[in-house]
Image: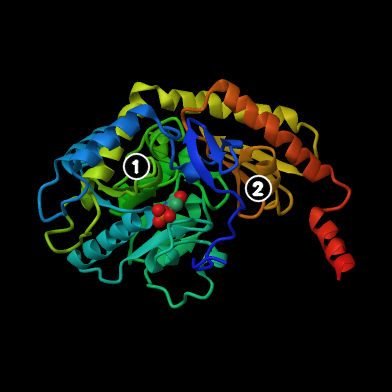
Amino acid sequence: MTHLMNTYNRLPVAFTHGKGACLYDEHGNEYLDALAGIAVNGVGHAHPKLTAALTDQVNRLIHTSNVYRVREQELLADRICQLSGMQEVFFGNSGSEANEAALKLVRMLGHKRGQPEAQTIVMERAWHGRTLATLAATGSDKARKGFEPFPTGFIQVPYNDIAAVKRIVDSDRRVLAVWLEVLQGEGGIYVADLDYVKALRRLCDERGLLLMIDEIQSGIGRTGKWFAHQWADIRPDVMTLAKGLGSGVPIGACVAAGAAVGVFGPGNHGTTFGGNPLAMRAGIETLAIIESDGLMANAVAQGSRIIEGIKRALNGVSGVVQVRGMGLMIGIELDRPCNELVRRALARGLLINVTHDTVIRLLPPLILSAEEALMIVDRLAPVIRTFLTAPLPASANLDNADQKAA
Ligand SMILES: *Cc1c(COP(=O)(O)O)cnc(C)c1O
């Protein structure tokens, strides 16, 4: 028994340290990390350049507050705008907070335009966070259940369906924004067609709507571009970042361009911790490492190595629905719930995740070597094959065991 609130079904393992793409537990066992703290540890564990930068920063200054100028904030905002072609940034401490800022920006812009009832179109299976407003925009019944009533202002449509968005925009004059992930992460690694993303950009331009892209999981080099929407050669009006930006130091960013610029004034929005020198230094150093070490090209190379390897190893095995992804954001969809694969992989020294019940999700660090990519395939494919070809589902075996024990 611990004194922690019971919000997670935790795996029975605790890590003491890491190095690169590996983690080590309390008994000295080594694990290959194909989850990277849920797309957070892009530069791997204990990267020497990151460690040196953070040590230096801790020795100088951790926090002062937004009462004062924060030089590191200005530098990281410059860099993000340079990489995205966007114009201004608000820093918070998490993805949910970045998204809250984005939603408050839409509300405020609505009020300024005399549209206090402004609506945001959101997607089925979308994931935007756990605060009340971000949960209202999230398409997971499991996460939402028990937290009603939610803030209003959202209209949900099917993902990757431009006609569905057009129908709403044509029939509801209150719509002010369209919000999506270019690849849905928690929703099951569903990848939008780039033509759909381009068509959304055109539609938003024609109708004066904000195009908002949640890059919290897909951004910071994971798909092989700084931001996944750059594959579609477009620029959003609002982009949110978090996970990979700080390499594990809590951070979130709401980035604005075009009509979303200059919406907030002093006093409209804020945070105590957000944008502190430690988090900013983590962001600056993370972006520097990704660039100098060529990690985006590596994400593309190792991502295809994993996808090809898994396809080859599971060729002809029935029960594999699809292997898909971009760069090092990979989903292997099976035809049945497969949450127990997380434990089976753990027992073989591999850290993975299952999302949406049927999709094995791989989010390895961007520093992954070719050997490590092949090692992921070598450890994972047999686990999947055994699971899919076993005569009885393991849950039935467990039920039998329970009955015998009773
Ligand atoms: C993780 C995630 C969030 C929420 O971020 P938190 O830091 O957990 O609040 C929002 N959107 C997407 C796409 C995510 O993957």
Residue 72 position, x and y percent, is 18, 40
Q: Where residue 333 is drawn, which disc sits there?
A: none
Residue 68 position, x and y percent, is 10, 51
In the image, is 44 to the left or to the right of 69?
A: right
The C terminus: image quadrant? bottom right
Q: Are marks 1 and 2 in contact (CB under 8 Å)?
A: no
Q: Nearer the viewer, residue 257 or 3?
A: 3
Instruction: Measure the C-alpha gap from mark 1 to mark 2.
Output: 26 Å
Q: How many marks?
A: 2
Residue 192 visible in the picture: no
Q: How is the image coloured?
A: rainbow
Image quarter of residue 332 = top right
Q: Secondary structure at mark 1?
A: helix
Residue 146 vertical position relative to residue 118 in the rendered view, above or below: below
- Residue sticking out furthest to the front: 27
Q: Nearer the viewer, residue 140 or 230?
A: 140
Residue 235 position, x and y percent, is 32, 40
Image quarter of residue 386 = top right
Q: Nearer the viewer, residue 4 or 274?
A: 4
Residue 260 vertical position relative to residue 74 in the rendered view, above or below: below
In the image, is 125 to the left or to the right of 199?
A: right
Residue, disc 1: 246
The N terminus: image quadrant? bottom right
Residue type marked 1: Gly
Residue 274 position, x and y percent, is 25, 53
